Image: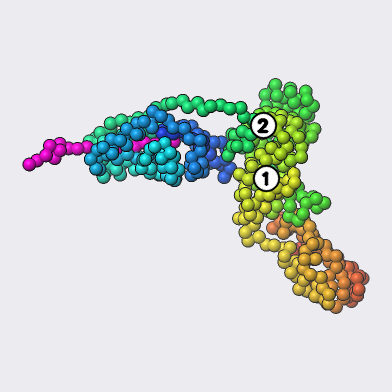
């Protein structure tokens, strides 16, 4: 006997729901990146309509974490629950309900849904491309599903699915739904501005200003201001005459306060009377200046092969500018530290007193890969050919005489080394080697303390055309 259901075609129903900003909202952002630096952040709704500019990419790091501060969108969640209930009550294989998310990991979504009593199958695509959602649904159609429910907050995703479904006229589109909007107003509590900044993974929005190189160790960029701001700055004593703020970024090495290979980075605005001069154009402007300065510093690190960078975190100075909302020094220092640790790997950053130091060999190892370490080569040569007499000084004593900015731009000054034939002697050398540039120079001198070699008057000084000539002269003194 034929049963009625064998005579009537039983449709197979696929119900697909997006998660972010469809089933729930959360504190998760899409970061707009340029040259590896975050330019701004977008919430899922903003990302759904954002058109990237040339050179921009997206960072979805927040969507790989545990869902933070989730808020269920109740009307949409109720629709999801109804579809799940129908699937449980229907015949096996007749209905399938899926959370189809652009997230790379599905576990955070599954975990959250279970906390609100929803047990749903989650498919993480790991892609924000609308076509990938359409392709996944098309694969299900080819498996036999012929009725499609689809809910998503993105018009781009809805359009992609609609276009795909046009190829299958026999597939029934029971509902192509856009997000049911529901305003969720969390309870507000007073929060200090400085605390708010400290809690953010992304310190508000910013832009990268256009900058230009003015010298080997200096870049500048200009920011237009309105007449009211110009008048205010003039009135407070800032030396400015045009409606533009001209910022500078410098790196410098001072042998009196910086160790070998270390530079200090500074930024400021021309015309300021002191480093703490009030500009007070808002936090976004300040963030833009800081992140532009960091991008400039990165360029100079690469150009000058800076191994260690030192930045003043201003931990001991009270905020008098108003730009930081009057926060205490420790809070402001923490903000600087947080920005820098987001820009560079945390393992490369350490805080020493009021200063923040970045080990660029850890932060940017590719810059130093294959670099010719002339310091090591010169010390090796001195140890092998000159410092071999009885009672010769250990290598670490020789290394203490190194000063300078890098392994190709340095000075070596020895307290004393022990020559195998002539006893105690002083050896000094200066090397400035920028790969054949006009400013390259190589010079060395010796002073004989115990015995004087034939043909010498007790001291000798030489300059050389290249580093190899310097090494050959050291060897000739053996």
In the rendered structure, find residue 297 and report the number of the disc placed on it. 1
Estimate the x, y position of residue 333 in percent, counting from the top left: 70, 40
Image color mode:
rainbow
Residue depicted at x 26% and y 45%: 143
Residue depicted at x 67% and y 52%: 359
**Corner quadrant of residue 9:** top left
The residue singled out by tag 2 in the image is 223
Assign a secondary structure to mark 1.
helix
**Vertical placement of residue 53 versus 265, above or below:** above
Q: Is residue 207 visible?
A: no
The crowding category of the residue bearing disc 2, from other C-alpha atoms within 10 Å (few below 14, some 14 to 19, many at least 20), is few
Q: Nearer the viewer, mark 2 or mark 1?
A: 1
Q: Is residue 37 magenta?
A: no
Q: Is residue 6 visible?
A: yes
Magenta span of residues: 1-20
Estimate the x, y position of residue 45 in percent, counting from the top left: 46, 32
Q: CA distance from mark 2 to mark 1?
A: 18 Å
**Corner quadrant of residue 477:** bottom right
**308 or 210, which is in the foreground?**
308
Specify which label sits upstream in the sequence, 2 or 1.
Answer: 2
**119 or 103, which is in the foreground?**
119
Q: Is residue 8 magenta?
A: yes
Q: Is 136 left or right of 242, judged from the image as shown?
A: left
Estimate the x, y position of residue 337 in percent, counting from the top left: 67, 43
Q: Is 410 left or right of 55, judged from the image as shown?
A: right
Residue depicted at x 76% and y 34%: 318
């Amino acid at each position: 006997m034929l049963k009625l259901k064998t005579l009537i075609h039983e449709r197979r129903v696929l119900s697909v729901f997006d998660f972010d900003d469809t089933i729930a909202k959360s504190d998760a952002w899409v970061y707009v990146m340029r040259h590896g630096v975050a330019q701004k952040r977008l919430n899922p709704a903003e990302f759904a309509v954002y058109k990237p500019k040339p050179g921009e990419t997206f960072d979805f790091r927040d969507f790989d974490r545990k869902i933070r501060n989730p808020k269920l969108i109740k009307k949409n969640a109720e629709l999801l629950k109804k579809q799940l209930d129908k699937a449980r009550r229907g015949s096996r294989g007749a209905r399938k309900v899926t959370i189809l998310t652009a997230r790379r990991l599905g576990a955070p979504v599954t975990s959250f849904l279970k906390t609100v009593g929803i047990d749903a199958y989650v498919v993480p695509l790991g892609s924000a491309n609308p076509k990938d959602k359409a392709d996944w649904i098309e694969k299900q159609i080819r498996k036999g599903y012929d009725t499609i429910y689809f809910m998503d907050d993105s018009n781009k995703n809805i359009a992609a699915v609609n276009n795909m479904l046009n190829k299958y006229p026999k597939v029934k589109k029971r509902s192509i739904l856009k997000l049911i909007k529901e305003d969720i107003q969390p309870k507000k509590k007073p929060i200090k501005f400085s605390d708010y900044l400290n809690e953010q993974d992304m310190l508000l929005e910013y832009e990268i200003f256009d900058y230009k190189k003015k010298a080997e160790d200096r870049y500048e960029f200009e920011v237009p201001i309105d007449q009211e701001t110009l008048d205010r700055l003039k009135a407070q004593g800032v030396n400015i005459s045009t409606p533009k703020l001209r910022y500078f970024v410098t790196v410098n090495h001072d042998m009196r306060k910086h160790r070998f290979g270390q530079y200090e980075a500074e930024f400021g605005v021309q015309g300021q009377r002191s480093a703490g001069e009030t500009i007070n154009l808002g936090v976004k402007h300040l963030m833009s200046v800081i992140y532009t300065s960091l991008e400039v510093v990165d360029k100079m690190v690469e150009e000058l092969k800076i191994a260690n960078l030192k930045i003043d975190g201003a931990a001991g100075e009270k905020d008098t500018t108003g730009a930081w909302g009057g926060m205490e020094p420790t809070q402001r220092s923490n903000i600087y530290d947080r920005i820098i640790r987001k820009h560079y790997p945390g393992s490369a950053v350490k805080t020493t007193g009021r200063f923040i130091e970045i080990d660029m060999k850890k932060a940017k190892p590719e810059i130093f890969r294959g670099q010719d370490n002339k310091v090591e080569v010169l010390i090796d040569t001195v140890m092998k050919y000159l410092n071999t007499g009885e009672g010769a000084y250990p290598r670490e004593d020789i290394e203490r005489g190194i000063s300078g900015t890098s392994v190709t731009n340095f000075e070596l000054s020895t307290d004393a080394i022990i020559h195998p034939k002539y006893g105690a002697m002083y050896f000094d050398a200066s090397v400035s080697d920028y790969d054949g540039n006009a400013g390259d120079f190589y010079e060395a001198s010796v002073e004989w303390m115990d015995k004087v070699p034939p043909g010498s008057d007790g001291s000798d000084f030489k300059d050389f055309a290249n580093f190899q000539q310097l090494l050959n002269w050291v060897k000739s003194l053996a």
